[in-house]
Each structure stands twice: as structure tokens, then as C-alpha cells.
Image: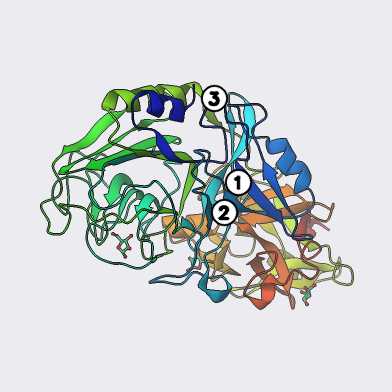
Amino acid sequence: AGPCDIYSSGGTPCIAAHSTTRALYSAYSGSLYQVKRGSDGATTNIAPLSAGGVANAAAQDTFCASTTCLITIIYDQSGKGNHLTQAPPGGFSGPESNGYDNLASAIGAPVTLNGQKAYGVFVSPGTGYRNNAASGTATADVAEGMYAIFDGTHYNGGCCFDYGNAEVSSTDTGNGHMEALYFGDNTVWGKGSGSGPWVMADLENGLFSGVSSGTNTGDPSVSYRFLTATLKGGPNLWSIRGGNAASGSLSTYYSGVRPTASGYNPMKKEGAIILGIGGDNSVGAQGTFYEGVMTSGYPSDATENSVQANIVAAKYATTSLTSGPALTAGSSVSLRVTTSGYDTRYLAHTGTTVNTQVVTSSSTTALKQQASWTVRAGLGNSACFSFESKDTPGSYIRHYNFALLLAASDGTKQFNEDATFCTQTGLSGQGSTIRAWGYPTRFFRHYSNVAYVASNGGVNTFDSSTSFNDDHITGDPAVEDV
Ligand code: AHR
Ligand code: AHR
Ligand code: AHR
């Protein structure tokens, strides 16, 4: 059985079922998600390998070979047609043209399920999916349930990495107009014990961890690499639960009456569905989503416990974030441009600006050093890499407003993540293409000889898709050794 078969047996059927990794009904063999590739704008649907099975990630890899791919649609498996697509602007605008949110990279969150490769949905700040015309979702004070599997190590304090029920207008229409799972370490409204991150409920104008606004110590900090989170709510009753999606059972973080703050009892749910954003399209949050559902009716704890057992049996596990030529921590590299006419240039820095410069064996030692980097384990994720300056130890390549800069480490989580990059087989067939860990739609790219993390098409000049594949920067032995 799949999670939605279990919810059905419990009398609280799924009315939305979203996953890029697997079928959530044992009989489901339809499309899980759609990807769109950068080379020609073509789309394809990815289905499970067999009914009830894991996504056919190899079909995606073949379709997306030598180009970039975005997740354009996350299909609803419930039959209600509650698909998730690129979120439109609301109270806040997204970064894409006309205020739409970004779409997620199709390769940002690789995992295995029972040893078979699949991809989750890696939400960078700015990314969001939504359905403002969902059918069968709970409205007003009607009962519903939901669960999601998140990456408990990928979060931030921005507003708001959510999955669940929200406003149909993409605007803040008042307290109680949302009921969505939240995951992160935002402390503007509520929090739990410790320093976070926490599973909370986004009920609009408030993230709730229990019966009162503010701190509720029953809601623990949780950072399981694979995190199961549940939320359910009905008339003057709601609950948050969570646990390790890879083993064990769920714990109840809160179960009881509606918050004491005014406006949340009765609820005024509107029935839209969001992923990765706040109800008003706040787009500051990050997180990773693998699967999730929404139900009709208030699921029993026993039903949720059976769903957790099903999730554990799916055997989520990590897999490599890199591909192509290997980099070795501790080694020196120089990164040479591959664009025809520019291929005597190397990634270098002039002060804090990261650019490309012509370097030859007769260049000065100073310039050679400016174009040489010590490979380090990724400061923000040790499965990827950071590049420490040869001539300015303690300073690293980071991105800021998507430009590459040389900056001294300040030790913050933001710095560490902005200084972490993952290598993959070169899009042009040469060397490595290097993507930003936290923005997997964005790759090292030179433009007018200045270096950026650029997307393959987008609102910035440096995102130009013209010569995108060739403008990447590939690894060479350190030029200081030339
Ligand atoms: O409730 C927290 C956030 O407040 C909501 O997600 C958003 O709509 C509002 O800004
Ligand atoms: O480079 C994109 C973002 O710009 C970084 O993640 C952040 O530090 C800055 O605001
Ligand atoms: O960085 C040099 C060139 O500038 C790039 O190849 C091109 O995309 C841009 O015009």
C-alpha cells in the first residue's frame, strides 16, 4: 500500500498527493512531475518505474543530458487535479518576470529510495509552487490532515517554507486563513525549544508551535536528514507531529485546542495549496520537499503512524551531489574558461571581484596566485566544495546577489551556504560545470569577463541563455604550478 491507500483505509482520503520521488498509491502509474529543459524549452513527464513505484529518474537524466532542467508541474496523484505549478505574485512578488516565483531545479535534491535514484524539490529563496483553484481541499473550519517529508538540514529563517492550505488570492486575508506545515528556524512569530529548526503550523500572521503564540517547549528542534512532519486541524482541535523519515515512529509535538490568540478559532481556511512560500507569496524561505499529501477529514494518530511506517519502508537515503571529474579537498585548482575565444582566461579575483583573466606561464606570480584556489570540503555542505583563495587564505568564493565575490569567511550559515558549490559533468561536454549548492538552477558563469552564478535564461543580463553551456568554467591543474 502507499500512504494514500493508508489514509483511505483510515476514512480520511487524500485530496492532494504530491511527490517527485514515488507513487503515493500502490496502483498509481501516472505522471509524477513534469520537467522543462533549457536547450529547447521542451517538456516531458516523469512517471514511476512501475505502478506504486519510484520515479524514473533515468528518464529525466536522459531528457536533461547536456542542458538544465526545471520542475514545471508537480502532479496531483489523487485524481482531483490539484497540480502544483509556478506560483504567481501575490502580496509579494517572485523574482521571475511578471512577479512569478522561480521554478526548482530538477537536480538539486538527488536521493535514493530502496537504492533507486530519484529527485526531490529543492526550494531556494524565490522558488514557489501553488494551486489557487484546488478542489476538495478543506475550507473554513472543516477538518483536514497533511504530511510532508522534508530535508531537516535544509532550512532558513525566511518566510515561509510551507506545504499545505492557503489563501486563494495569494494575499494575506487574515488570521486563520491558512493551515500549512512550516519547517525552518524563523522566530518572528513562534518557536519551539532549542535553536531550531522546528516543525510549526502556518495559520496566517503566525507560525504556531502550540497553544500560545511564542515559544512552546513541547515542539523540539529537529534536523533529521529526512524528516516526516504532520499537521491536522478541525473544529477547536489541531496537532503537529514529527519524526525521522528513515527510522522509528512519530512523536506528538502538540495536540489540543486551537491557539488562544484571536482569529484562529474557528478557522477560515480557503483551500489553495502552496509549496515553498507563505500564504501571501512571501518568498524568503528555503527547504527541500520530497513528498506530501493533504487529506479530507482529521486523520487518526494510528493512521499517521501507519503512514510513517510506509515512509520508513520506502528507505530514503542520500546519494552523491556531484558528478563528472572529481575534485579533491586540499588540492589546488585553477578554473579555465571553455568559451571559444576566451579559453586563455581563468577564474581569478581582483580585490573582492571575481572575474576571468588571461593567465600564461609568463604571468606574474601574483596573478597566478589570484587565479589559483585551494579546494575545501563545502563549508555549507561537505558533499560539495568551497574554493579558498591562494593569496588570501581565509577568503572564499561566495555569491552575493548572484555575483561571485571573494570574501573572508564570517562563519555564518549564510556565508557557508553561499560559499558552497557542487561540480557536475560539464554541460558542454568539457570538464565540470559548477552549481551553487543553495541555488541549483545557478552555475559558475562568466559574462563580460565577470563571474556570476547564473541561470540558463532569466531576468538578469548575466542569465542570458546565449552561450550559457560554453560560458562555464572547468578545472585545470593550478596555474601557479604551470
Ligand atoms: O503566517 C506567517 C506568514 O505571514 C504567512 O505565510 C504570510 O502570508 C504572512 O506574511
Ligand atoms: O547570491 C544570492 C543571495 O544574495 C545570497 O544567497 C545572499 O547572501 C545574498 O542576498
Ligand atoms: O565573459 C565573456 C562573454 O561575455 C561571454 O562569453 C558572453 O556570454 C558574454 O557576452
Q: Which residue is mark 2?
A: 420
Marks 2 and 3: CB-CB under 8 Å? no
Q: Is residue 246 at least partly visible in the picture?
A: no
Residue most extreme to the right: 341
Dot 3 falls on a residue whose secondary structure is loop
Residue 128, x across and y down, in percent: 49, 58
Name the kind of residue labelled 1 in the image: Cys
Answer with mark 2 or mark 3, whichever residue precedes in sequence.
Answer: 3
Residue at the spot 32% in from the left edge and 47% down from the top edge: 138
Identify the amino acid type marked 2.
Thr
Where is residue 204 drawn, in percent x and y?
27, 59
- Find the distance from the CA under tag 2 to the CA under tag 1: 6 Å
Return the disc, 2 or 1, that comes first in the chain's sequence: 1
Q: Position of residue 384 (x, y in %)?
A: 60, 46
Determine whether label 3 and label 1 are within 8 Å by CB.
no
Q: Residue 204 vs residue 406: left or right? A: left
For residue 95, the mark is none
User: Do tag 2 and tag 1 residues touch (Cβ < 8 Å)?
Assistant: yes
Q: Which residue is mark 3?
A: 26
**Is residue 219 shown left or right of residue 339?**
left
- Residue identified by numbered label 1: 384
